[in-house]
Amino acid sequence: MKKFAMAATGGILLGAVATTQIAGPLIAQEAQNNASVYEQLDLFGDVFERIRSEYVEEADESELIEAAIDGMLSSLDPHSSYLSPEDAEEMRTQTRGEFGGLGIEVTQEEGFVKVVSPIDGTPADAAGIEAGDFITGVDGENLMGLTLDEAVERMRGPVGSEITITVVREGVEQPFEVSIVRDTITLTAVRSRIEGETVVLRLVTFSDQTYPNLKEQLAEKVEEAGGMDNVNGFVIDLRNNPGGLLNQAIAVSDAFLDAGEIVSTRGRAPEDGQRWNAEEGDLTEGKPIVVLINGGSASASEIVAGALQDHRRAIVVGTKSFGKGSVQTVMPLRGDSAMRLTTQRYYTPSGRSIQALGISPDIIVQQPRRAPEEAAQEDEEETPGFRSESDLRGALENDSLSEDEVRQIEEDRERAEEAAQLREQDYQLAYAIDILKGLTALGPDAE
């Protein structure tokens, strides 16, 4: 026992000596780093005082400090920023679903303002602004060199006022100008309709109303269809949905899952990680689901698409999503201001981070583009008329079918014509609906 105690004591003493030898340089290095930080802060103070005393015009001190804070945050990544009291209040208003502006979600890429997505039913959407567009100027003024907040500020203005933005678009040789009238943007979080036997749920944004709207409209459309037995599946349309609240993305994902992980987040410290799991209760009762995404589907949209894809609960169709796999925390500051800071990355149930990579669809389907002049030309041209057997004089009638069978054939043909028309209007959605029809035709085993 004594020998063991001695060995233990020796180990403790040796450990103490080793710790002192290692900790000494570490402490010295930390002190040196702190000294360097204080020197940099002193440098900031020197610059601030020089501006106050020697700048050609008297500068607003509070604006200088706010600009310095904003520069510090915006240097981290495109999504971290300082929010003035006005900006903080506007952000709170946006999450409630109503705000003033053009109706576009933007980010900054290599110094340029890039459109993540236009919001359905807004002035920007009506003006033809597309996901991936770059906005390089406002009312003839170049935006290059401005921070994202400064550029956004130039695009803001009174409701009813007109703004002309300069747009650079991939595939279009020259920049072009678009005039838009600012308006109050009232977001309808979820829009729904029935296409044949398919319920289409279009999620516009992830605000406070998204999950309640989804649940309500899903039930309404199922009832309108005559019950779940008359529904062959659901299309969750997340195209051009720029995201929003994390808790709403979790709730929407949970609406279609009975169990399993939805999303996890990991921060700088391991203990900051969180994980959310689905609870029992699938609003669609296990019916097939197709999720539509494109390059304008970001953040919360990617959480939903990733969760349903990883659990093989849905087929994801469209084009690669935006790739915003980070979580921002809004932290209140003094004077009603706030800062938006990137604090975590999120991961899909399979453990993949989609930051900068996006969600890859199971089936890639491009949305065909037609130039405006081509569309106008096609509208002007008359569709050639074709004659069928029934148009011929003296054609024999079909006497082998009952009236009900004839009516059924005519209804089937009418539905097929409507589907063909939908392909002209929205090829990706028509493709998603065709997938659900195919799954239904194969029977329950295919689902």
Image (cartoon, rainbow, N blue to C red):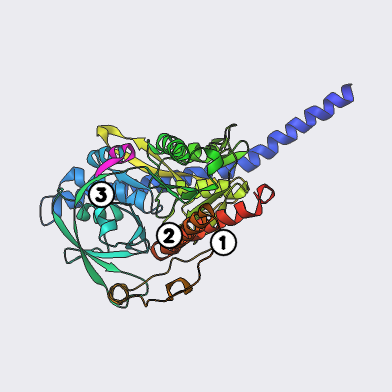
Label 1, label 3: how many angstroms apart (C-alpha)? 45 Å
Left or right of 376? Residue 344 is right
**What's the CA distance linking mark 3 and mark 2?**
55 Å
Measure the alpha-carbon separation of dots 1 and 2: 23 Å
Q: Earlier in the sequence, mark 1 or mark 2?
A: 1
Q: At 43% from the left edge and 55% from the top edge, which residue is drawn?
A: 239
Q: Amino acid at mark 3?
A: Ala
Q: In the current view of this chain or complex, which residue is farthest to the front?
A: 394
Magenta-colored span: 93-99
First in sequence, mark 1 or 3: give its number: 3
Q: Residues within 10 Å of mark 3 (few under 14, many from 20)?
A: some
Toward the viewer: 239 or 438? 438
Q: Is residue 40 magenta?
A: no
Q: Secondary structure at mark 2?
A: helix
**Amino acid type, label 1:** Ile
The 10 Å Cα crowd at callout 2, few under 14, some 14 to 19, many 20 or more, is few
Along the viewing direction, whichever of 60 and 375 lies nearer the viewer: 375
Residue bearing mark 1: 363
Q: Is residue 330 visible?
A: yes
Please tell me whether residue 96 belongs to the stretch shown in magenta: yes
**Which label sits on residue 418?**
2
Residue 195: image location, x then y, percent: 45, 51
Q: Is residue 368 above or below residue 5?
A: below
**Secondary structure of the residue carrying numbered label 1:** strand
Indicate the amino acid at tag 2: Glu
Q: Which mark is residue 67?
A: 3
